[in-house]
Image (tube, rainbow, N blue to C red):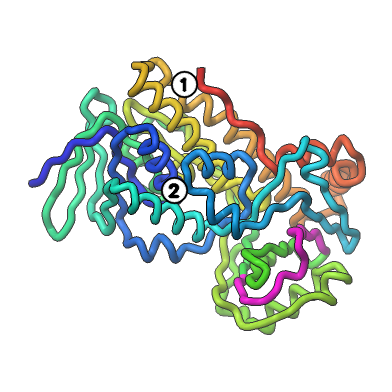
Amino acid sequence: MRRQKTQVVIVGAGPSGLLLGQLLHKQGIDNVIVERVSAEYVLGRIRAGVIEQGFSDLMEEAGVSGRMKAEGEVHHAVEIATYGDVHSIDLSGLTGGKVVTVYGQTEITHDLMDARSASGQQTIYEAADVQPHDINTDSPFVTYTVDGQQQVLECDYIAGCDGYHGICRPSIPEGVLKEYEKIYPFGWLGLLADTPPVNFELIYIKHERGFALCSKRSETRSRYYLEVPVDEKVENWSDDRFWEELRRRLPADAEKRLVTGPSLEKSIAPLRSFVAEPMQYGRMFLVGDAAHIVPPTGAKGLNLAASDVSTLYRILTKVFKQGRTDLIEKYSQICLRRVWHGVRFSWWMTSMLHSFDESDIEGRIRSSELSFFLKEEAGRRVLAQQYVGLPYEEIE
């Protein structure tokens, strides 16, 4: 059995784990990342691509923003179409100059992997049987198996960046966590294609046939989504059927600009909201999807993970450099304040733009509320402030 000592063990080599590792390394804090799948598998995940201002700033602080600045698309607005009527939300004008950047999660992960490789910090891929131990003591450790041999990583702290299906959250004793969940009755059928986007700005679409989203990864790669029943099967959707249905939901001008082509990837993602409280137990911290899931409508999933990373990185820096162990207990409450704002905004966007019965009183109220937020400057300002991302809290 091989034993190794480090300051922080990060479980999970997705973008949140890699970003945390890079930020800690910049502060001289040693860390090891343990990941159960291969690097190629991690890079193959097709995920979010809308990056808040705070996330962009954090990438710059980590020293990995060069390619994002060169290749990412800065967006000053977002469009919301309701039954063919298109409303432009001036993000930068309503928020004092803040923007979002369209840059795929795969590219972020690639940049962070390259930076980690250059830094010499250790990442262990294809680690089996990963398990945190003694997390509520002063001497936590993580075990894992490689090539049939058990390994031990002794550490000061553990960061659970291993997603909803990871091992870290279930390692917290029963009765400590309280979990909140909402399952939506629909999913998103997504299609990725090497076709020019239908519009420079993202278009969120409310239509009588269901929600749609026109997104992008670059000027030559598009990402489109259709609302479908939660029990729908991707096998039922040929490329031709997808493009035909998208045309029906697009505003007239956008429909004329649509360029179709063969799909690179098609999948259906169910929509749900999930939050686990607290996000810290002993010397283990939950980060990102390990603690919270939001429907993608508000583009908050990866961005909430980044704000968790920012909070944890700043706390651990003060712990190791200033001995501020009193801050450890503040991690969860600081993160959860922003998480619940993101959960609420994602729920609101989902409720406003997806298919619900509009004939009853709740439907009429929903229509009136959406009209206010789109047509009144005060409403558009609130929407814009939340879309570009609320500010990160200072760590005092």
Whether residue 121 is visible, yes or no, is yes
Q: Compared to 212, does 365 lie above or below?
A: above
Per the image, is 128 magenta?
no
Residue 338, quarter of the rendered image = top right
- Binning the other alpha carbons within 10 Å of mark 2 as few (below 14), some (14 to 19) or many (20 upward) gives some
The answer to whether residue 229 is left or right of residue 363 is left
Residue occupying the point 15% across, 60% down: 147
Which disc, if any, is residue 164?
2
Relative to the observer, which residue lies in front, 4 or 243?
4
Residue occupying the point 54% across, 46% down: 293
Find the residue positioned furthest to the left: 1
User: Can you give x and y, in whole percent of width and height, for residue 242 in the image?
Assistant: 68, 77
The answer to whether residue 17 is left or right of residue 35 is right
Mark found first going from the N terminus, 2 or 1: 2
User: Can you give x and y, in whole percent of width and height, for residue 44 in the image?
Assistant: 44, 66
Read off the residue under disc 1.
330
Q: Secondary structure at mark 2?
A: loop
Give the residue type that dot 2 points to.
Tyr
Q: Which residues are magenta?
A: 191-207
Which disc, if any, is residue 23?
none
Per the image, is 196 magenta?
yes
Residue 241, quarter of the rendered image = bottom right
Q: Compared to 106, does 142 lie above or below?
A: above
Give the residue type that dot 1 points to.
Lys
